[in-house]
Image (cartoon, rainbow, N blue to C red):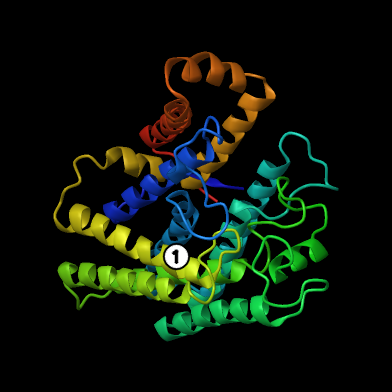
Amino acid sequence: MSSIVSAPSGRLVSLDAFRGATMAAMVLVNNNGDSRSTFPPLLHAKWNGWTFTDLVFPFFLWIVGISMTLSYARRVESGADKRLLLLHSLRRAALIFGLGLLLNGFPNYDLSTLRIPGVLQRIAVCYFIGSCILLYTGWRGMIAALVACCTAYWVLMTSIDVPGYGRGVLEPIGNFGQWVDQLLLPGHLYSQTRIWDPEGFVSTLPAIANVLFGALAGLLLRRGDLPPAEKTSWLFVCGLALASLAGFLDHFMPINKQLWTPPYALLTSGFAFAGFAASYWLIDVKGFSRHTGPFVIYGSNAIVVYAASGLFARLLSLTGIRQPLYEGFFAAVAPPMLASLLYALMHVAVMYLLAWGLYRRGWFVRF
């Protein structure tokens, strides 16, 4: 079961704010009023390429990596048993994975069609594998692991013949990842595609790299021999290098969120490095933390907010409230694109009230 603990102390305010901003963005892009009339940055790229929306999930995985490093490194230094930490990681991952399954099935749990992959499930798997690598290797091992994940994905997607399609297909149907998902999980894939899943087996490999890049950023932050300004510079440099490498590799394998290609993992990790560098410099180094409170609150119970957001949206649809609310109020007072945005912002506001209520009482749910 999850536990409720007292408010954490000694944390990087910039990381909490960055997590909160990412979670607010996740709620925003997941709850457009009408996907046919939505500002393009608030929609996923149709296939190749990227939008603002395509940055949100990998940012969260990157944050998982940096948070994991900062937490576990302190425990290891204080003499904690690595095996117990690994068991803690396994338990937490299993709970997050199970919560994802509960969300996927709500409210009708038909085990014959229950979607098994999902956002929380990918977070759980990447977190656990990242924990194993972090606990038993150093920075060289992490770099080797993320290179291995991306290389293995590249080889699998380009070198193995898919029956009826051949090798190297990077379209929705006929790619190696789609074939594996349909082979192993028939009937348990994303309902809008049925025969492939954006959080499937093979695409989890480069997603693990996002977590490991975050873990490396955590190691950089813990360097006691580097002043904050130099840490910030290195974060920016890493971000620029990864984004540039992604742009180069895009000529050979496209930046694609649905396939979670290595160039996509590199690009999003690069942007996460740069985005967090700005947050770290402004908030923790320069002390501009006056207006960060709402973001810190939003990120203080991130998994709870994500799960509650999904349940809230599902309940609005199931009770028949969604369409009258959207069409009778939002679409009636604003043009289509703005109405869709306002509806999404309503979800952001409701989830903020939940996060604020938990934060005000000092409740921080840890899975």
Q: Nearer the viewer, residue 313 or 151?
A: 151
Q: Residue at x 21, y 70 (%)?
A: 233
Looking at the image, residue 7 lies above or below residue 216? above
SS label for mark 1: helix
Decide if residue 316 is in sight here.
Answer: yes
Looking at the image, residue 345 lies above or below residue 180? above
Spot occupied by residue 283 in the image (x, y as percentages of width and height): 21, 52
Q: Which residue is mark 1?
A: 65
Q: Is residue 150 left or right of residue 67?
A: right
Spot occupied by residue 85 in the image (x, y as percentages of width and height): 52, 68
Decide if residue 364 is in sight here.
Answer: no
Q: Quadrant of residue 203?
A: bottom right
Numbered circles on residues, count: 1
Q: Nearer the viewer, residue 224 or 5?
A: 224
Looking at the image, residue 197 lies above or below residue 342? below
Spot occupied by residue 300 in the image (x, y as percentages of width and height): 40, 45
Q: Nearer the viewer, residue 162 or 6?
A: 162
Q: Residue at x 41, y 71 (%)?
A: 247
Mark 1 residue crowding within 10 angstroms, few (<14) / some (14–19) / many (20+): many
Q: Which residue is situated farthest in the right direction here?
A: 112
Q: Quadrant of residue 278?
A: bottom left
Spot occupied by residue 125 in the image (x, y as percentages of width and height): 61, 63
Q: Residue at x 48, y 15 (%)?
A: 332
Q: Residue at x 54, y 77 (%)?
A: 150
- The kind of residue tagged 1 is Gly
Q: Is residue 345 left or right of residue 91?
A: left
